[in-house]
């Protein structure tokens, strides 16, 4: 049965194509001279076959009206030219909806159009900072300019032509976390665009390793954490420490090991410490410390359970276990992916 349906559909589609014979082809757009932001837009194409004597032109949500094939080429303007608009034009026969064509024209630039940068992108060509510079691929769309100036961190760096885009350039490395790239249309002080570039990590493994953290002995109900690590590879001159949503500060590598605290026991189940290099943010290590190191030794024996009641698909369980040592006054019971509650050790 499926095979018969497919054959019937194929026949219907082929028959429709044979009977329509309407073709709109070789669609072209020509832009006239701009005057006060207005320009004539001439549209032309080849038309063959059956259909109406009329066609409709649409684009960018606009209906430019109905025209006759006999009057081709037709002027759908004058249009108010928006230099930031990506223009598209569609032509459709008035009676045969399947007879149409479409042209993605792009931006329309009047000779004296407003200077503008669009879709500025910067792509790192490698994942490392090599020597004194790193390479990027620069690209953007523009109007109202033929050349532009490049500034890096406020300093003039290079002159380039729009025709050179996409452009590969080497950015000098000054040890910053990021560099600010500013592009300015040549001889047009008020036409510019900026983008921040994250400085890539260069030709070296992460310069920090072997992070260790140790909770020191408790004193008056509080404790400190000793933190240290190796730093033999490439790194900045400082590093940050954070964890559990808290910023513990910025430290010099010369200060290692550092002492953090005081911490109140039991506030967090585990204390997290994330060390991140100040120059290479992708270079970081993490370590955990027991959040309650002040508690004494404790022992909880194997629980004994017994089903004591079962009714309508539910049952009750009694639980008992041995314990000794320095425990709190309650315990949490979990199982099968859920928490059953907190219970008193009485």
Image (cartoon, helix red, strand yellow):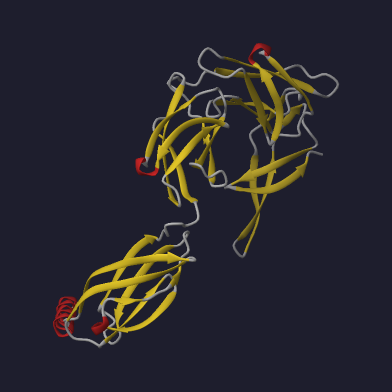
User: Front-most of 300 and 90?
Assistant: 90
253 displayed left or right of 81: right
The residue sitting at 64% across, 47% down in the picture is: 306
User: Front-most of 213 and 257?
Assistant: 257
Visible residue check, residue 335: yes
* Residue 318 point in image, percent of width and height: 69, 47
Q: How many badges with numbers are in the image?
A: 0
251 displayed left or right of 280: right
The residue sitting at 76% across, 23% down in the picture is: 261
Q: Quick check: 2 above or below 306?
A: below
The residue sitting at 45% across, 23% down in the picture is: 133
User: For residue 202, which quarter of the picture?
Assistant: top left
**Farthest residue, direction right:** 220
In the rendered view of the protein, which quadrant contains the N terminus? bottom left
The residue sitting at 44% across, 73% down in the picture is: 61
Q: Quick check: 341 above or below 246?
A: below
In the rendered view of the protein, which quadrant contains the C terminus? top right
208 displayed left or right of 296: left
* Residue 316 point in image, percent of width and height: 66, 54
* Residue 151 point in image, percent of width and height: 52, 34
User: Front-most of 255 and 267?
Assistant: 255
208 displayed left or right of 225: left
């Amino acid at each position: 049965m499926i095979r018969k349906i497919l054959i019937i559909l194929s026949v219907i589609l082929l028959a429709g194509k044979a009977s329509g014979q309407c073709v709109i082809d070789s669609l072209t757009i020509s832009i006239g001279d701009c005057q006060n932001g207005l320009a004539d837009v001439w549209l032309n194409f080849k038309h063959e076959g059956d259909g109406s004597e009329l066609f409709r032109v649409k684009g960018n949500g606009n209906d430019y009206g109905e025209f006759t094939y006999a009057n081709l080429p037709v002027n759908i303007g004058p249009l108010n030219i928006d230099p930031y608009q990506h223009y598209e034009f569609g032509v459709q026969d008035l009676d045969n909806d399947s007879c149409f064509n479409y042209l993605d024209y792009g931006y329309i630039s009047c000779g004296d159009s407003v200077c503008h940068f669009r879709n500025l992108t910067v792509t790192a060509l490698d994942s490392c900072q090599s020597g004194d510079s790193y390479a990027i691929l620069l690209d953007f769309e523009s109007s109202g300019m033929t050349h532009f100036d490049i500034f890096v961190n406020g300093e003039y760096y290079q002159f380039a032509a729009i025709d050179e885009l996409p452009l590969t350039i080497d950015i000098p490395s000054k040890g910053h976390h990021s560099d600010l790239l500013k592009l300015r249309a040549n001889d047009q002080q008020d036409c510019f665009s900026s983008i921040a570039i994250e400085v890539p990590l260069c030709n070296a493994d992460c310069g920090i390793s072997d992070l260790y953290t140790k909770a020191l002995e408790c004193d008056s109900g509080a404790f400190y954490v000793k933190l240290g690590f190796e730093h033999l590879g490439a790194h900045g001159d400082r590093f940050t420490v954070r964890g559990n949503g808290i910023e513990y500060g910025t430290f010099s590598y010369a200060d290692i090991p550092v002492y953090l605290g005081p911490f109140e026991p039991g506030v967090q189940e585990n204390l997290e410490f994330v060390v991140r290099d100040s120059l290479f943010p992708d270079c970081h290590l993490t370590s955990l410390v027991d959040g309650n190191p002040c508690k004494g030794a404790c022992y909880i024996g194997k629980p004994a359970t017994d089903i004591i009641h079962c009714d309508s698909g539910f049952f009750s369980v009694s639980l008992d276990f041995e314990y000794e040592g320095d425990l709190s006054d309650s315990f949490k019971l979990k199982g099968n992916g859920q928490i059953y509650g907190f219970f008193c050790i009485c």
